[in-house]
Image (cartoon, helix red, strand yellow):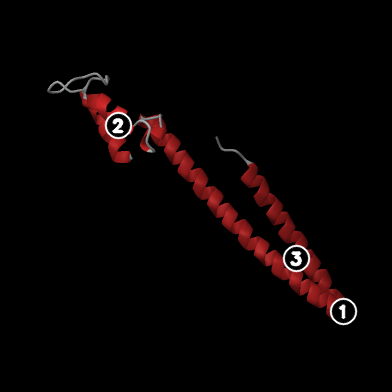
């Protein structure tokens, strides 16, 4: 995709900013644009510096969200384990352990809610 749009930009530069510039009776920039339209490559209409910034932003957003979701999943698994240990301590009648597990669950819930708030933020 990047090579196709890079070639397109290069042809636009050689054509002095127009797609209708001809070379040996052909309009290569216009032909390339028509070929790319209707494909996955043609889905990105923003080109040039703005397109690079937009693509970079989308990649960064996806990477951050992926990291946050992975962290959230890991904490949720840890919370489930703490709940199981709390249930075992409750069955054994160990009130001190139950209180410790309750505190740990409360802290994990706070971390999970903070992650959820960060995931709700829309970057663009």
Does 96 sit above or below residue 120?
Answer: below
What whole-number distance in Å separates the C-alpha atoms at marks 1 and 3? Answer: 18 Å
Q: Secondary structure at mark 1?
A: loop
**How far is the residue under mark 1 from the one under mark 2?**
72 Å
Dot 2: few (<14), some (14–19), or many (≥20) neighbours within 10 Å? few
Say which of marks 1 and 2 sits in front.
2
Q: Quadrant of the C terminus?
A: top right
Residue 1 image offset from top left, x and y in percent: 33, 40
Marks 2/3: CA–CA distance: 58 Å
Are discs 1 and 3 less than 8 Å apart at CB?
A: no
**Residue 42 in the figure: left or right of residue 23:** right
Comparing 14 with 43, the one in front is: 43
**Sequence-first tag of 1 and 3:** 1
What residue does disc 3 label? 104
User: Residue at horizontal 62%, vertical 62%?
Assistant: 74
- In the foreground, 91 or 26: 26
Q: Position of residue 12 (x, y in %)?
A: 26, 25
In the rendered image, residue 45, in percent from the top left (x then y), is placed at 40, 29
Mark 1 lies on residue: 93
Q: Residue at x 77, y 60 (%)?
A: 106
* Front one among 30 and 96: 30
Q: Quadrant of residue 36?
A: top left
Residue extending farthest bottom: 92
The nearer-to-camera label among 2 and 3 is: 2
| Residue found at x 67% / y 66% | 78
In terms of sequence position, does the residue under pointer 1 or pointer 2 come before the other? 2
Residue 34 vs residue 94: left or right? left
Q: Which dot marks residue 35?
A: 2
Q: Looking at the rendering, which quadrant does residue 38 occupy? A: top left
């Amino acid at each position: 995709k990047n090579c196709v749009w890079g070639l397109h930009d290069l042809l636009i530069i050689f054509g002095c900013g127009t797609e209708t510039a001809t070379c040996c009776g052909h309009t290569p920039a216009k032909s390339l644009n028509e070929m790319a339209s209707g494909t996955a490559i043609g889905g990105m209409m923003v080109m040039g510096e703005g397109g690079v910034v937009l693509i970079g932003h989308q990649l960064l957003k996806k990477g951050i969200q992926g990291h946050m979701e992975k962290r959230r999943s890991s904490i949720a698994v840890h919370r489930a384990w703490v709940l199981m240990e709390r249930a075992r301590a409750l069955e054994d009648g160990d009130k001190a352990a139950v209180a410790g597990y309750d505190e740990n669950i409360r802290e994990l819930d706070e971390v999970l809610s903070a992650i959820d708030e960060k995931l709700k933020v829309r970057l663009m």
